[in-house]
Image (cartoon, rainbow, N blue to C red):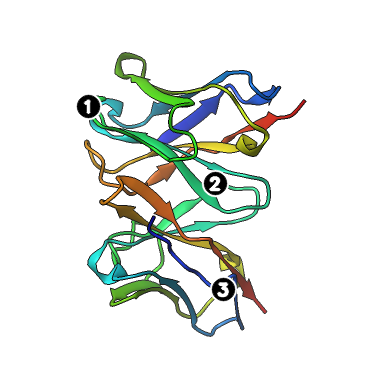
Amino acid sequence: SYVLTQPPSVSVAPGKTARITCGANRIGSKSVHWYQQKPGQAPVLVMYYNDDRPSGIPERFSGSNSGNTATLTISSVEAGEEADYYCQVWDSDTDHVVFGGGTKLTVL
Amino acid sequence: QVHLVEFGGGAVQPGRSLTLSCVGSGFNFNNYGMHWARQAPGKGLQWVAVMSSDGSDIYYADSVKGRFSISRDNAKNTLYLQMNSLRPEDTSVYYCARDPGAGVAGSIDYWGQGTLVTVSS
């Protein structure tokens, strides 16, 4: 099965840039989607098809995907963006949705 | 505004069955694939199943295949998840979620608020 690997935690000071990675074999050949989940809330889509932002998501959120790593970048991080972030792909070999294990973003 | 509301969660004994429902509003339910996903307490997201808009394509996670069944009634804007032979490890918040494609695009653009299923004796 296809496995997406995320760091369990990332910490960043307010106003700095946070980079959350999602690693997998040849992930650059797939479309990666990212979700933000705050405590007690449902997930929210923050990036789709690698680098497209849904309406309402700040331009400070950006995405990239190449080789074996996809990255969600949040510039000028705000306290309200402290949350769990999940990457996700569609594995066409198994017809399964696959989620990464999630990364807890802490704003110091 | 897209709105998804899940119903039917609760406490159930191992080996028993439970059916979840999800009602969609604010969009043309007929035109979108729909997913179920879940999240065990304190754990990450886990995908459960997906059904295309017309029901022609259905896929399940290995952990639920043969025990869970996804279905939909487009006339009622409702998605279902029939869960049989429930196990303690099925204890999770279950989310209904919309796929942006009519088929199965394999991503999720909107999520419901979830319903908790607790499997325990």
Q: Residues within 10 Å of mark 1 (few under 14, many from 20)?
A: few
Front: mark 1 or 3:
1
Q: Which residue position is annotated with label 3?
A: A78
Read off the chain for label 2: A
**Amino acid tagged 1:** Ser
| Quarter placement of the N terminus of chain A | bottom left
**Residue name at image x 58 percent, y 18 percent:** B17
Q: Residue reaching furthest top? A: B75
Sort mark 3 into few (<14), some (14-19) or many (20+) by Cα contacts within 10 Å: some
Quarter of the image with the C terminus of chain A in it: bottom right
- Residue A47 figure quarter: bottom left
The mark lying in front, picked from 2 and 3, is: 2
- Left or right of residue A9, residue B111 in this image: left
**Contact (CB < 8 A) between labels 1 and 3?**
no
Q: Residue at x 43, y 34 (%)?
A: B3
Q: Which of the two labelled residues, at mark 2 and mark 3, occupies the earlier sequence position?
A: 2
The 10 Å Cα crowd at callout 2, few under 14, some 14 to 19, many 20 or more, is some
CA separation in Å, label 1 and label 3: 44 Å
Chain letter behind tag 1? B
**Which of the numbered marks, if any, corresponds to residue B56?**
1
The chain identifier of the residue carrying mark 3 reads: A
**Dots 1 and 3 on the same chain:** no
Where is residue A102 drawn, in percent x and y? 54, 62
Residue A42, numbered label: 2
Q: Position of residue B13 (x, y in %)?
A: 71, 22
Tell me the CA gap for discs 2 and 3.
20 Å
Secondary structure beneath disc 2? loop
Amino acid type at circle 3 is Glu
Image location of residue B46, percent across then percent down? 50, 47
| Three-letter code for the amino acid on which mark 2 is drawn | Ala
